[in-house]
Image (cartoon, helix red, strand yellow):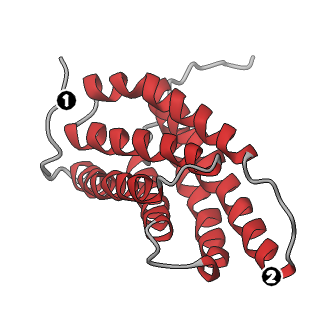
Amino acid sequence: MEEKSSVSVKINIADAGPAGWISYSIATWMAWAFLCGYVNNKALIFMSAVSLACTIPYLGAAITQLKLGNLAGGVTWLYFGSFFAFASALNYGISYFAGVYKWELDSRILGYEWLILGIVLILTTPIFARHAPAAATISVIGADVGIVTLALIYWGLNLSLLSGWSFFVAGLFGIIMAAGGILEGAGMKFPMGRPLFK
C-alpha cells in the first residue's frame, strides 16, 4: 500500500527590488545626460544597448515583488521594464538609425506613451509616499515631473532642462534606494528616510 505524506515546503524569496532601482537610476541618468545636452545623438546606440540590459533587473524586481505580495511595487517595476527599458531601447535604436539613414519619422506618437506612463505614476505616487522610504517618494516625484515634461517635449515644448534635471533627482534618490535595499538585505541599516505620509 502506497503511503501519501503531506510535506509543507516553505520557499523563501529575496526581494530583487534594489536591482530594479539600479536599472531605474541608470535609465534616468542617461535621460538626464541626453536631455541636458551632455551627450548627443551619437550616444543613442549605447543608450539602446544599456536600456535593453536594464530590462532584466526590472523584470527580476517585478517578479519578486509580485511573489512577495507587493502588487503596487511589482506592477510598477513591470511597466518600467516594458516601457522605460525595453521600449526605450528600441526607440533609442530607431532614433539612432533614423539619423544615419535620414528616415522621416513622427516621434510625436511617443508623447502619448509617456503621458500615459506619467499620469499612472502620478496617480500612484501616494502609495510610495505612504508605504515607501522618503528617498523612494522623492525619486518617484522626480520621475513624475520628468516623464510628463518628456511627453510635452515630444509635442514640441522646450522643456528639456526641466525634464532632464527631474530625471537627475529621480536617479540620485534611486541610487540611495538601490544601495539601501542591498545593505538592508544584508542586515545593515542605511538612511533612506521614513515614509512621508502616515
Left or right: 116, with 170 as reference point: right
Q: How crowded is mark 1: few (under 14 residues within 10 Å), some or many (20 or more)?
A: some
Say which residue appears at 63% left-offset and 82% top-offset.
42
Q: Where is residue 60 drawn, in percent x and y?
A: 54, 49
Q: Which residue, given by chain and number where applicable, does mark 1 sit on?
A: 195
| 105, above or below 129, in the image | below
Quarter of the picture containing the C terminus is top left
Q: Name the residue under label 2.
A: 100
Which comes sooner in the sequence, label 2 or label 1? 2
Q: Is mark 2 on a helix, strand or loop?
A: helix
Residue type beneath disc 2: Val
Image coordinates for residue 1, horizontal then vertical, percent: 75, 17
Badge 2: residue crowd in 10 Å (few <14, some 14–19, many ≥20): few
Q: Which of marks 2 and 1 is in front?
A: 2
Position of residue 99 measured from the top left corner of the image (x, y, whole percent): 77, 76
Circles 2 and 1, Cβ within 8 Å, touching? The answer is no
- Would you say 22 lies left or right of 66 here? left
How many marks are shown on the rendered structure? 2
Q: Please, what secondary structure does the residue beneath circle 1 have? A: loop
Name the residue: 78% across, 66% down.
Answer: 94
> At label 1, which amino acid type do we have?
Pro
